[in-house]
Image: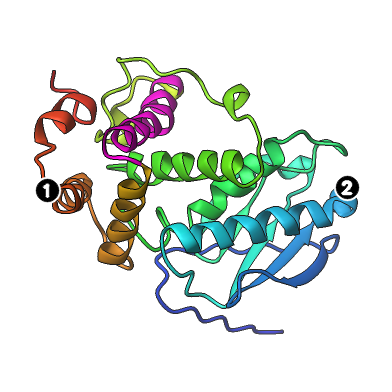
């Protein structure tokens, strides 16, 4: 018998992966964290693409929101047969889209940027994913789209659905959405547009201050929707209750 012990501080979830086929490499990511890459052999030739995107994403999120405090970030690329295990997030560890194509499109960068954004929204700022999933999924989607557009110059429109006023039941228990489409439209798309709308109202500079203040105030804690609204109100000096009633709680 071989017994291994693992320890991590300030995490609230974990996962584990193993394969005799992984191609492993370790690169320096942001100044304080190493990127540990576990590639399916089918994507061995894409190593530089994974490293470049993950390093740039982590660097951008540190600048926009706050320091990534862990010593490493592990990125696992599942095999094609392991597709259901892909596109998931855990503190210090993400799985990305499965290696189903040898020449994937920019969906590779989108999923990678999205899952790394979850290190902040769900990982360190640890909301309840089941009861208020928009606080991680919308925030990660908002962050990944901004990164893909600003840092990589990619057009994200092909990957996201247009906004509808019907997407306003964001702070809802996940099991109360009618189906997967209803869940995605509110939790991912509707919430992203709400954050973009707030940014349009207060300006990009002030929005970055809001997001950074929310991160610093609530990292390693368990905030809810009202906690985000409180930070927004404190940073902007105005009430957002009516806006949240209409656009987040779906009361009007």
Q: Is residue 181 left or right of residue 84?
A: left
* Residue 132 picture quarter: top left
- Image spot of residue 137 (x, y percent): 42, 41
Instruction: Name the residue carrying label 2.
Output: 42
Magenta highlight on residue 185: yes
Q: Is residue 167 above or below residue 145?
A: above
Looking at the rendering, the stretch of residues picked out in magenta corresponds to 181-203
Instruction: Look at the image and tell me in which quarter the N terminus lies.
Output: bottom right
- Can see residue 86? no
The local secondary structure at tag 1 comes to loop
Neighbours of disc 2 within 10 Å: few (<14), some (14-19), many (20+): some
- Between 116 and 214, which is closer to the camera in this rendering? 214
The residue at the point 24 percent across, 35 percent down is: 171
Q: Is residue 48 left or right of residue 172?
A: right
Q: Is residue 208 left or right of residue 6?
A: left
- Between 23 and 241, which is closer to the camera in this rendering? 241
Q: Is residue 161 above or below residue 235?
A: above
Which numbered marker is on residue 237?
1
Neighbours of disc 1 within 10 Å: few (<14), some (14-19), many (20+): few
- Image spot of residue 21 (x, y percent): 86, 60
Q: Is residue 119 above or below residue 103?
A: below
- Can see residue 178? yes
* Residue 99 picture quarter: top right
The residue at the point 51 percent across, 81 percent down is: 7
């Amino acid at each position: 018998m071989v017994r291994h012990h693992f320890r991590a501080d300030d995490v609230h979830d974990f996962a584990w992966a193993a394969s005799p086929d992984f191609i492993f490499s370790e690169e320096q990511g942001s100044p304080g964290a190493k990127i540990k890459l576990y590639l399916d052999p089918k994507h061995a030739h894409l190593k530089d693409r994974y490293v470049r995107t993950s390093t740039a994403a982590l660097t951008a999120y540190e600048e926009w929101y706050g320091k990534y405090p862990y010593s490493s970030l592990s990125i696992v690329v599942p095999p094609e047969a392991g597709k259901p295990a892909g596109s998931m997030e855990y503190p210090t560890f993400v799985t990305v889209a499965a290696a189903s194509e040898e020449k994937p499109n920019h969906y590779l960068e989108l999923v990678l940027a999205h899952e790394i954004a979850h290190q902040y929204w769900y990982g360190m700022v640890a909301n309840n994913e089941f009861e208020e999933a928009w606080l991680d999924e919308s925030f990660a989607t908002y962050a990944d789209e901004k990164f893909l557009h600003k840092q990589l110059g990619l057009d994200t429109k092909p990957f996201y659905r247009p906004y509808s006023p019907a997407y306003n039941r964001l702070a809802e228990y996940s099991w109360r959405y009618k189906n997967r489409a209803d869940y995605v439209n509110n939790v991912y798309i509707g919430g992203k547009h709400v954050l973009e709308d707030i940014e349009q109202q207060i300006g990009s500079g002030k929005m970055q201050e809001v997001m950074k203040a929310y991160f610093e105030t609530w990292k390693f804690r368990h905030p809810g929707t009202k906690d985000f609204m409180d930070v927004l109100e404190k940073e902007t000096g105005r009430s957002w209750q009516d806006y949240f009633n209409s656009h987040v709680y779906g009361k009007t």
